[in-house]
Amino acid sequence: MVFQYKHIENLPPLAWLAEIKGGIVKVIYGSMVEVMENWFVEGAWSGEFEQGDFLEANWFCGTGARNCGDKIVFSTPTHVTYGLYSVENLVGGYSISNSLYLLMASENLRYDVDYVNYEVDFNTILDGINRYKNRLHVFDATGKEREVRLEYYKEIVISSQGKYESNNKKSTKTFTCFDDYYNRLIGSMRNMVDNAQNSLRSQMYGMVTTVSKGYDAPCCAAVAKKIGCNTALTFRPEGKYKDDCGTDVAKALGYEEVIEVDANEYLSRTDLVETEYICSGELGAQISFCSFDNYVRGNILFTGERGDSIWGRFSHNRNNEFCFEDMLSHLGSCERRLWLNYISVPMPLYGASSWTSIYDISNSKEMTSWCVNNNYDRPIPRRIVEQAGVEREQFGVIKHGAGFVYKFDWMNRITSRMSKTTADSFKQFVEQYKKLHV
């Protein structure tokens, strides 16, 4: 197999698309995709950058591919907040991309405006890596029905003969105790940062973290501080975040720069930014985080996504297949990150393919001193944060949560949560495509 590369200046910096036919792999890519003779990648992993060993890494936040002689192997992240998209193309091969919308534009595909279950289909990733709906119904320019294949936590192997295989990534080795979990977590995060800051890269990434008064973001901030992060982002103590601003927690952790932003800043924008956060099936939950845009560019961003399940002491549905009940998919930023050029690190998902062992640690005798014995009890993050210097009463007292969703709402309420530009555009769309069912 042979890579043929072409840089496209106006692509999102981290976006790429590969067209495979026979032994030729034609790759177009944005400015921050790392391109080598036999591999390309965006993101960082817990291994040596110059080795390009992201396929073997136990922690990979990004996507890429490697030439393995008579086959090419593509890799998703080792988490499930974004993946890869592919389609059989019209020249008898395959097209694969880390951007659904780059793939659809390249193949001239479009959604079916009469199909109402796209959100449901996207969010089946919450059913786990072995049960999600991995085909997306679309049309091509002639009106012919096509299918886009969605891949999460996978390695995709395409041979020079055109055979397509998709296999789950290797599971994480079971964690035996808190020290084992914490040391492996710290070690993998530190190795990933070293990778992202390697001088051989086109760009070396900095670090920022989110922080709040809950459990998950403070835990991420504590770990990030341990490996050199000094900038923390939080929402101002206004509105629903009145009692959830994480400034005091960040200062207790020793952060030198704490930036408070307005969670409703997006309401004054005119660039239809809401569309970028709902286009992948999650209806609005992460829009407030676009207030962090100017601070995440060119950085690793540590977040606490899925911490309420992975670190919860009473997670009744713990499993090793990334199945999360009664949650949002957190797919909202999967396209946005490609434009903003940041490495998304959902820290609680480290080792989540061995979630049952993490749950066992949370409920072990060694964690008794860090249990508060109520329904909001997460001893692993409590131990990490308290041992980093934060007082018990400063965090993890009341569950707040961030964001909102645009579903199960009425028009006036939906548009009141949009910028005027987006609201006007949305009303026009609804007027054009709405149908009355009797």
Image: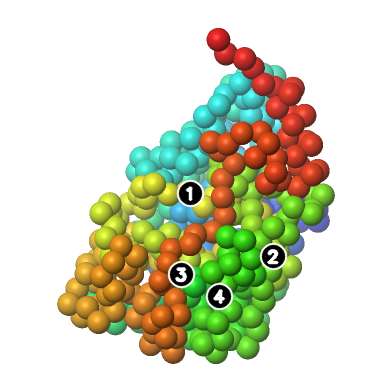
Q: Residues within 10 Å of mark 1 (few under 14, many from 20)?
A: many
The CA span between labels 4 and 1 is: 24 Å
The CA span between labels 2 and 3 is: 18 Å
Labels 4 & 1 near each other (Cβ < 8 A)? no
Task: Tell me the residue that label 3 is attached to.
Answer: 214
The answer to which of marks 2 and 3 sits earlier in the sequence is: 3
The CA span between labels 2 and 4 is: 13 Å
Task: Tell me the residue that label 4 is attached to.
Answer: 246
Give how far across and how far down residue 311 sits, in percent: 35, 66
Give how far across and how far down residue 273 sits, in percent: 73, 50
**Is residue 82 shown above or below 180?**
above
The answer to which of marks 2 and 4 sits earlier in the sequence is: 4
The answer to which of marks 3 and 1 sits earlier in the sequence is: 3
The answer to which of marks 2 and 1 sits earlier in the sequence is: 2
Give how far across and how far down residue 437 sits, in percent: 57, 13
Q: Say which mark, if any, is on residue 329.
A: 1
Q: Amino acid at mark 3?
A: Gly
Q: Amino acid at mark 2?
A: Asp
The answer to which of marks 4 and 1 sits earlier in the sequence is: 4
How has the structure been colored for display? rainbow
Q: Residues within 10 Å of mark 2 (few under 14, many from 20)?
A: some
